[in-house]
Amino acid sequence: MSRAEKKVPEKKPAKRHATQQSVDQAVKSICDIMRRGNCAGAMQYVPELTWILFLRILDEREQREEQESAAVGGDFRPSLASPFRWRDWGAPPAESAQEPEPGWKRLALKKSAAGAFFNFVNTELLPHLKKLKTIPDATPRQKVISEIMTGVERVRIDTERNFQDVLDKVHQLTTEAVDTTHVFTLSQVYEGLLLKMGEKGNDGGQFFTPRQVISAMVKVIDPAIDETVYDPSCGTGGFLAQSYEHIHARLGKAINAAQLENLKHNGFFGREKENLIYPIALANLVLHGIDKPNLWHGNTLTGQELYGGLFTEAPQTFDVILTNPPFGGKEGPDAQTNFDYKTGATQVLFLQHIIRSLGNGGRCGIVLDEGLLFRTNEDAFTKTKRKLLDECDLWCVVSLPGGVFTAAGAGVKTNLLFFTKGKPTTKIWYYDMTDVKVRKKTPLTLAHFDDFFKLLPKRAESPLSWTVDMDERKRIAREEAEPLKAQATAKARQAAQVSDQLKELKKAKPLDAGAVKKAEATLDALTRESRERAAKADEILAAVYDLKAVNPHRKLDVDDRTPEELIALIETKGREVAEALAALKAM
């Protein structure tokens, strides 16, 4: 028997993690090594741990798939060959490991010249993984591997010793070693690391939406097994991952093999611009069980593509869109040219993209900042919201409490909007959560949404919920605006007549300067009055699209004391201050 045909010995079982504390401690110990090894903050060590953990889980998954395929006499095409598999170079080796025993390549490099291990990883392994997508007939998984590795130029950890310490600890974090009965799955452990990136001061908040908000939105939209789910600004992939878990959990054991295969390969689509975040999103989705994340790398608004090889089978429109687009950004002309209503406001352009990307009957849940809801002083804001209400049924707006995104470095007031494309909005049901106090030690939880979910099915009225009749609001606005429009038209007609008279006066000989001056003044006044009335009418009609949540049941705290009572109070307080000062002087 040749060396290459040697039977691989039974691998020793990895340390069993039976408690959440055990897993958390294991991950913390890995991060501690990375922090001392030149990856000081989460924005440095999370991307580094991403590709290392991904290659570990990939190897475990492919070994299991190979065994399952062999058991039924099927063919299996591995994504990686020796010596580029984790089991070759990453696994801790026995003292005399030979190919193909676990860790054989790592041991051989250890016995070589100083620096041989880093040299292999940086000049052979990483370039090989990046080129996988270019090989003939590359599989979707090979393309995913290449894209996850695309931003990894070299190992960031400073020494081979620290790097190998990380490998040893990651090797123990297997799906088999984590008891999911009592412990978060590895995907949730990884989400905890992503949360570190989203904390204030780490500059990662723009890529992270709190899990509780995502869970609530997914529950409302309720994506189904046969629907396509899309996030045009997917960040680390939270909405897509949670949608997968929601669908999988709802079906449970009732899901069949064909449905599961379709769900893992054809159900989830997204776009992400940032080079640092795109590979992390891919790894996150794979860790959640989505074998083929159909993610497009590039600028959603300009259409500028960096890599689209995983997005080739994406439909033109989608059944479900769940997203938290960036707000507060400013886009240039290259982005604005693709949209009907041009503006530099990033969130407005994203809303136009979403309306366009949603199929007829499709449902959307979106996080939007308060500014977009109430602003009617810019044409693009008003027209985009008009398009939303004309083409979609905006059936629910949830006013989130302040501070939901503060931990991620964003203190902007936000709302959740839910709508269905295909018919216009007639009524909007609002729910007010602004009384919830969100702080670092008392974060928003899914339990805070309990009352909302109780009232949602019937859109019930309560002290925290109410309905706005958009048809009635439009009717009232038209009634108020029409007289002003008529006055504006009449003034414009009079101005036109005076303009004609002015032309004749200027032609007359001799010139009557007084009459000309009077006519010019009259023309200016009529033009101004016409413009003012037309502007007022437009303002009234635009105000219909101020969608900000204003709770009509909330009692305002009004100070009803009279001026005399306030003066008396001030005088009393003044005497108290004077007496206190006198007592201090006497001491």
Image (cartoon, rainbow, N blue to C red):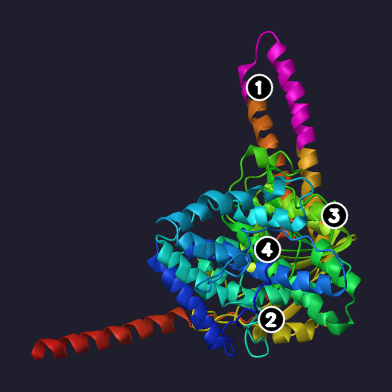
Q: Residue at x 44, y 78 (%)?
A: 563
Q: Specify which label sits upstream in the sequence, 4 or 3.
A: 4
SS assignment at label 4: loop
Q: Position of residue 350 (x, y in %)?
A: 70, 53
Q: Gap between marks 1 and 2, in whole Å?
A: 59 Å
Which residue, given by chain and number where applicable, does mark 2 sit on?
553
Residue 7, horizontal then vertical, whole percent: 69, 72
SS class of the residue under badge 3? Answer: loop
Q: Earlier in the sequence, mark 4 or mark 1?
A: 4
Total marks shown come to 4
Which residue is identified by label 3?
Answer: 317
Residue named by callout 4? 2
> Is there any visible trace of residue 82 in the rendered image?
yes
- Residues in magenta, as a range: 492-517
Considering depth in this image, is 553 or 432 the residue closer to the camera?
Answer: 432
Q: As displayed, is residue 102 above or below residue 461? A: above
Compute the Cα span from label 2 to label 3.
Answer: 39 Å
Q: Is residue 399 visible?
A: no
Residue 413 located within the stretch drawn in magenta: no
Q: Residues within 10 Å of mark 4 (few under 14, many from 20)?
A: few
Q: Earlier in the sequence, mark 1 or mark 2?
A: 1
Give the structural element (helix, strand or loop) at label 2. Answer: loop
Q: Nearer the viewer, residue 490 or 67?
A: 67
Tell me which corner region of the image, top left, top right, bottom left or bottom right, holds residue 376: bottom right
Can you identify the residue that label 1 sits on? 515
Question: How far separated are the C-alphas under marks 1 and 3?
Answer: 65 Å
Q: Could you tell me how far apart the alpha carbons at marks 4 and 1 are, in whole angstroms?
A: 113 Å
